Amino acid sequence: MQIDEFLSSVRSNIECQCVESKKESRRLSYGRFLISPLQASQANTLGVSLRRILLADIEAIRITSVYLPGVNHEYTTLSGFKESVKEILLNLREIVFTGTLSQSLKVILQVQGPKYVTAKDICLLDSSIELVDPDQPIVQITQPVDLYMELIIEKGTGYRNQDPEYLKPSLFPIDYVFTPIRSVNYLVNTFEEQGEKKELLILEVWTNGSITPRDALNKAAKILIQLFLPLLIEPSFTSSQNGKVAFQTHRNPDLLNETGITTENHMVSVPISNHRNSNENLHYKSIPIEELGLSVRAHNCLKKAGIQTVYDLMQYSPEGLLKIKSFGKRSAQQVIQALQQRFNILLSS
């Protein structure tokens, strides 16, 4: 069976349904999903895999360090401020951003007291990111004094633990787990269908409001697919001279070549169809250009040109990208590299 036929048969049999979705607050969203019918033991396998990916591999945008001029220690008490420096850092740690960010960003928070300072007082000149909760408290200034700080915002995954030894004076690191997922639970129920034992996977996802549970699950599924693509090679067994059986992998022309999948040095790559409008490429319509991790300039130029998805980019040649208004060679090269590295897409002339 060809891979495309196999995937279509799987999609027609197994369904994922969102049975409950609600936004409990600005910084808490909940989603409940049912995935069924699954064969015996498949629900637990899928539940564990999705839970690990959701908790560890979904990107988030966070404040990673703060520059406070004239402050040498995080336990310092500032005159005219209700909170200590440590409490201010903890409040900054709770600020949640949403949007796209291709590189670290420095923003400034400058206010004059007395004032109750919240996240909306941060000067966000970059329109590609925004605050999930603008009312998140930072500090209360009780006297007519000035507050100035520089914030470094970054995008990443996993836990970030910065070493203070490599930071300059008055620059304080903020340790954080780069994830928009607050919690993930799953439950397995069994039932019978036509006399055969089946399983139902119930998946619950809580996020911090920067992404919906549905989008988070969609990203986790894409990551799992990318992990399993290298396994789409067929094993073969050959007999050696000593009578033992040796295992190796090789290219199967019926399974791989007809579906556009090729292997080189036991690595699998999946190139797109040579026809830009081929039905095989329609699924790229659901992938926004934000997934490419482009610079702010390149991202904004594409948006102004009406390019919203990876499929839209596939309609351009390398030369055609240069005809986009304000789109230079460096931006075009960035797009070409991102398409090749993330989706193995090569734009044809």
Image (cartoon, grey):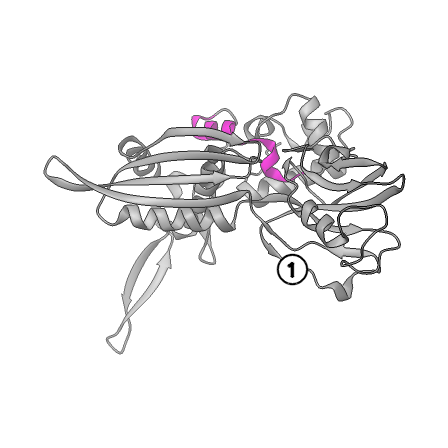
Q: Which residue is mark 1?
A: 161
Residue 31 placement, left or right of 181: left
- Secondary structure at badge 1 equals loop
Closer-to-camera residue (289/152): 152
Q: Quadrant of residue 247?
A: bottom left
Please report the residue visible at 79 percent of the width from the left and 61 percent of the height from the top.
Answer: 167
Q: Is residue 43 visible?
A: yes
Please report the residue visible at 56 percent of the width from the left and 43 percent of the height from the top.
Answer: 342
Place of residue 273 in the rendered image (x, y in percent of width and height, measured from the top left): 48, 33
Please report the residue visible at 58 percent of the width from the left and 37 percent of the height from the top.
Answer: 291
Q: Is residue 1 visible?
A: no
Place of residue 67 in the rendered image (x, y in percent of width and height, measured from the top left): 81, 51
Place of residue 42 in the rendered image (x, y in percent of width and height, measured from the top left): 27, 47
How many numbered marks does the figure carry?
A: 1
Please report the residue visible at 43 percent of the width from the left and 34 percent of the height from the top.
Answer: 31
Name the residue furthest bottom: 242
Residue 39 covered by magenta stretch:
no
Using a 10 Å C-alpha cutoff, classify the residue at mark 1 as few (fewer than 14 neighbours), some (14 to 19) or many (20 or more).
Answer: few
**Picture quarter with the C terminus:** top right
**Picture quarter with the N terminus:** top left
**Magenta residues, as a range?**
278-294
Q: Main secondary structure of the magenta part?
A: helix
Amino acid type, residue under disc 1 in the picture:
Asn
Residue 242 placement, left or right of 66: left
Place of residue 236 in the rendered image (x, y in percent of width and height, measured from the top left): 30, 59
